[in-house]
Image (tube, grey):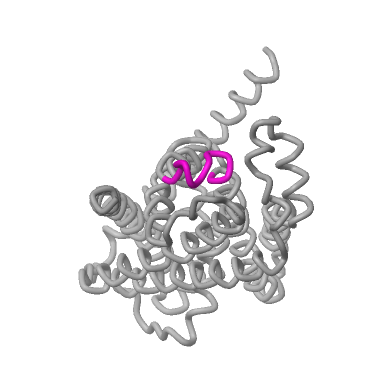
Amino acid sequence: MNKKQIFLLIKILVIVVVIAIFGRVLYKAWLDYQKMEVKPTIDWLMLSASAGVYFIALLFPGAFWHLLLKRFNEGSVDPPPGLWESICAHVCGQIGKYVPGKFMVVVIRTALIKSSRTSAAVAAAAAFLETLTMMAVGAFVACLFLTYHAVQTGNWTLLAASVAMVVCAGAPTIPSVFVWIVRKIGKNKVASELLNIDKLSFGTLARGWILELFCWAGFALSYWLTLKAVGVENLNLAADFPQAIGVTAFAVSAGFLILFLPGGLGARDLAFIGLMTPWLEARMPGSGAVMATIASVVVRLVWLTTEFLAACVLITLRGGLKKGVGNRE
């Protein structure tokens, strides 16, 4: 077997193991659910609120991508894409993460935004940088939470994993490092289209971190609303938010960085369940694992549905917007 075949075999084995473990957890949760005397019911209003908050959260990384597109297009004769156009393309690209490798995220966003105003190279470079920044911010937030968690439990493994995620995702976003990577792997034609890549600064990244923090806060609020929607008792947003954002940041970042898992399937869910079970057990004794599992499954369905509906609606609106601009011209 050559290296490519060995790597493929390892990926398949990891996927099988993760899915098998997740399936076992789901089966056990189902058995425990059947034993519950009072079964939880869904609050559809709260679930709708969760979906709405998640959609709003997706707008912030789209705004950062737009900022990068503007920076990389500085000095161009043609104006950069408008903010709404950039956000539409960015949100629609979310569905690409359900393809193994997650490269389709970049492909979709690039395909939707490239034009005479924005080259494919510029769009792809900005998409990679925004995604890495989002994961770095998420891993950093997770580090803050897991430091406290490790002190309380004595388990430093997850903290070490979170630190590794910060380094892996964050190091390539350092302006000098990012420019070096682009110059190194880009062909001459690509490099010539990224003449403004050197204009990337820590000031731009700082604004990106702020926007991405709002995104992670939105994800956490969406997850907290899902907990409320599935019937978790004794919730208080102010007191619960550090737990919600820490767990959400770690679970989503870990799921995304395992590139060959579509949508982080299994890994993200197991992280949610593992970190939330003790916390929920303290609020609902005997039902912590069941409620953590239900919440992980429901929040995945809510986010998946929101992403696909948003993509369908925004693609339609974007087409109408472009047609309107064409008619005016």
Question: Would residue 219 be visible to someone looking at this image?
Answer: yes
Q: Residue at x 31, y 65 (%)?
A: 51
Classify the position of the N terminus by image quarter: top right
Q: In this view, does 40 lie to the left or right of 203?
A: left
- Examine the image and state in which quarter residue 164 appears: bottom right
Out of 58 and 192, give the one closest to the viewer.
192
Q: Is residue 16 left or right of residue 92?
A: right
Q: Residue furthest top?
A: 1
Question: Would residue 305 be visible to someone looking at this image?
Answer: no
Residue 302: x, y in percent? Answer: 31, 58
- Examine the image and state in which quarter residue 165 appears: bottom right
Residue 28: x, y in percent? Answer: 39, 51
Compared with residue 97, is residue 241 higher up or lower down, i.e. above or below?
A: below
Residue 64 forms part of the magenta stretch? no
Q: Which residue is drawn at 52% across and 38% down?
A: 103
Compared with residue 273, is residue 187 higher up or lower down, i.e. above or below?
A: above
Out of 308 and 118, give the one closest to the viewer.
118
**Span of residues in magenta:** 113-123
Q: Residue at x 52, y 57 (%)?
A: 65
Q: Is residue 254 left or right of residue 155?
A: left
Residue 48: x, y in percent? Answer: 25, 68
Out of 275 and 5, give the one closest to the viewer.
5
Compared with residue 311, is residue 62 higher up or lower down, i.e. above or below?
A: below
Residue 25: x, y in percent? Answer: 43, 50
Q: Which residue is drawn at 45% across and 54% down?
A: 81
- Count of numbered labels shown in the rendering: 0
Residue 114 forms part of the magenta stretch? yes
